[in-house]
Image (cartoon, rainbow, N blue to C red):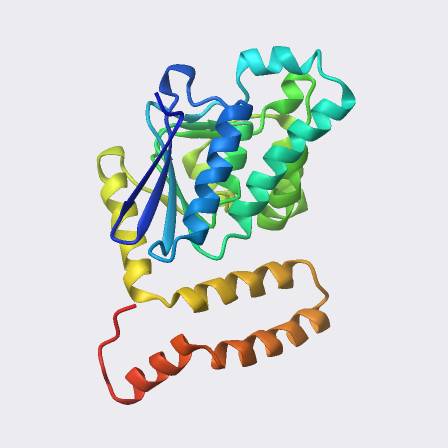
């Protein structure tokens, strides 16, 4: 059975965690397959939006128990290499030129919550719980901290990472961790409609440049980010999509991306 499934429909790539019997727990093989799938979607010109979801009742319970046992016998170098693989996956998701949507239909815990956290947009069912429980087992949420502090700010990040407590979807929405709460029976159709609207209603070049701009602004002073914005603006105006979009707007034409 494939640990990760990859499907395409209407220019939306679905990357599906498929280890329901293990609550979609993460191990090196699963992380590697996820990384390959995100690279495949990134390079596919027919794909404009990526949806990350999971089979089963849990989105992802974090690290696999057998994997955690193995880590205790690893050398420092082996643990560093292993951590780098997850770092590369998170980074590729966060910096993907395409919109990445998480469809969370069950609990997202520890590394599983990290997967959802680095997505651009997060849909969740009301019953889902979120949390970074690493400190409860003597571990640290090292990688996700780098992304979460940008997403939520220092105070909320400390609250979540230092306590290791789980929060419900309503609290996660209030904190800014997720974007939309949708009933279980409606979430698949809601995500499908949202993703397909993005695919048909937005320019791929504009999405890519906007994400680059936002990532740059996060890591720069106001002066530097404004200067970068000037450069991104000039770059965007030279793209084929911009010329096509402005021409359609001026001619009152209907534009399908």
Q: Residue 8 versus residue 182: which sits nearer the camera? A: 8
Residue shown at the point (44%, 55%) measured from the top left:
98
Q: Is residue 5 left or right of residue 171?
A: left
The x and y percentages for residue 140 are: 68, 27
Q: Is residue 203 above or below residue 169?
A: below
Q: 164 or 245: which is nearer to us? A: 245
Q: Quadrant of residue 110?
A: top right
The residue at the point 46 percent across, 43 percent down is: 38
Farthest residue to the right: give it.
76
Q: Quadrant of the C terminus?
A: bottom left
Q: Residue at x 25, y 70 (%)?
A: 256
Asked whether, in this view, residue 225 is left or right of residue 106, the answer is right
In the rendered structure, the answer to whether residue 231 lies left or right of residue 124 reads: right
Q: Position of residue 40 (x, y in %)?
A: 43, 45
Q: Position of residue 86 (x, y in %)?
A: 59, 34
Total count of labels: 0
The vertical placement of 174 against 253, above or below, is: above
**Quarter of the image where the N terminus is located:** top left
Asked whether residue 248 is in view, the answer is yes
Between 101 and 125, the residue placed more toward the observer is 101
Give x and y (percent) for residue 217.
63, 63
Residue 219 picture quarter:
bottom right
Residue at (76, 25) in percent of width and height: 77
């Amino acid at each position: 059975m494939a640990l990760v499934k990859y499907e395409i429909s209407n220019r939306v790539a679905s990357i599906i965690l498929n280890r329901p019997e293990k609550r979609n727990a993460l191990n090196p093989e699963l992380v590697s397959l996820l990384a390959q799938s995100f690279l495949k979607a990134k390079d596919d010109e027919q794909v404009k939006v990526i949806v990350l979801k999971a089979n089963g009742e849990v989105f992802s319970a974090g690290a696999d128990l057998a994997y955690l046992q193995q880590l205790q016998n690893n050398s420092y170098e082996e643990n560093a290499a292993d951590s780098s693989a997850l770092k590369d996956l998170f980074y590729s998701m966060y910096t993907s030129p395409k919109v990445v949507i998480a469809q969370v239909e069950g609990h997202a815990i520890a590394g599983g919550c990290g997967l959802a956290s680095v997505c651009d947009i997060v849909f969740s069912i009301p019953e889902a719980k979120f949390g970074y429980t690493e400190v409860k087992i003597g571990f640290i949420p090292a990688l996700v901290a780098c992304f979460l502090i940008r997403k939520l700010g220092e105070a909320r990040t400390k609250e979540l990472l230092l306590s290791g407590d789980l929060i419900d979807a309503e609290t996660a929405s209030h904190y800014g961790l997720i974007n939309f709460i949708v009933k279980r029976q409606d979430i698949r159709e809601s995500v499908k409609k949202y993703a397909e609207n993005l695919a048909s209603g937005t320019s791929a070049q504009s999405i890519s440049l906007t994400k680059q701009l936002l990532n740059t602004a996060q890591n720069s002073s106001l002066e530097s980010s404004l200067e970068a914005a000037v450069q991104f603006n000039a770059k965007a105006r030279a793209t084929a999509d911009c010329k096509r979009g402005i021409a359609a707007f001026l001619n009152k034409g209907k534009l399908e991306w």
